[in-house]
Amino acid sequence: MGLFGKRENSKKFKLAQAEKFNNLVIESVTERVDNEEILVGKSGSTSMRQNRFIVCSEGNVVFEGDVFEISISELMSRNGIIIQGWDFETERERTVVAHFSYYRKLSDAK
């Protein structure tokens, strides 16, 4: 169990996390490699389709993972999310951070 008693590895929790962070406008995407954050792209969005959580940046898919196999958590600053798990795009385990300047859903962006 996690800090607040939620079963963080349950399918229900993982689906709820993915839905919570679905359709967000992001400012930049970085990848954590050997304690460094490397810029992957600027401006983009998150989406969820057929139980896949997808991060797009600059018109390209930069991360795509199975909702039930990845971990999605919010940064303490609440201005981004950390996605960890198997990436179907690169076919390897990755840690990707999607940063947003403020919490805004795609449906709010005009």
Image (spheres, rainbow, N blue to C red):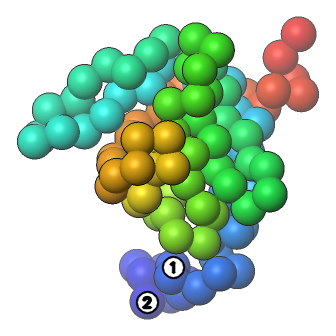
Disc assigned to residue 109: none
Marks 1 and 2, how far apart in space? Answer: 6 Å
Task: Please give the residue where the numbered disc 2 appears in the rendered image.
Answer: 1
Whether residue 65 is situated above or below residue 29 in the rendered picture: below
Picture residue at 63% right of the left edge, 63% below the top: 67
**83 and 51: which is toward the camera:** 51
Q: Point out residue 71 in the picture as x, y percentages from the top left corner.
A: 47, 63
Q: Residues at badges 1 and 2 in contact (C-beta under 8 Å)?
A: yes
- Outermost residue toward the front? 91
**Which quadrant of the structure image shows residue 47?**
top right
Decide if residue 103 is in sight here: no
Picture residue at 35% right of the left edge, 28% below the top: 30
**Mark 2 falls on what kind of element?**
loop
Task: Please give the residue where the numbered disc 1 appears in the rendered image.
Answer: 8
**39 and 24: which is toward the camera:** 39
**Which quadrant of the structure image shows residue 7?**
bottom right
The quadrant in which the C terminus is found is: top right
Decide if residue 15 is in sight here: yes
Q: Point out residue 48 in the picture as x, y percentages from the top left corner.
A: 75, 48
Amino acid beneath label 1: Glu
Whether residue 70 is situated above or below residue 2 in the rendered picture: above
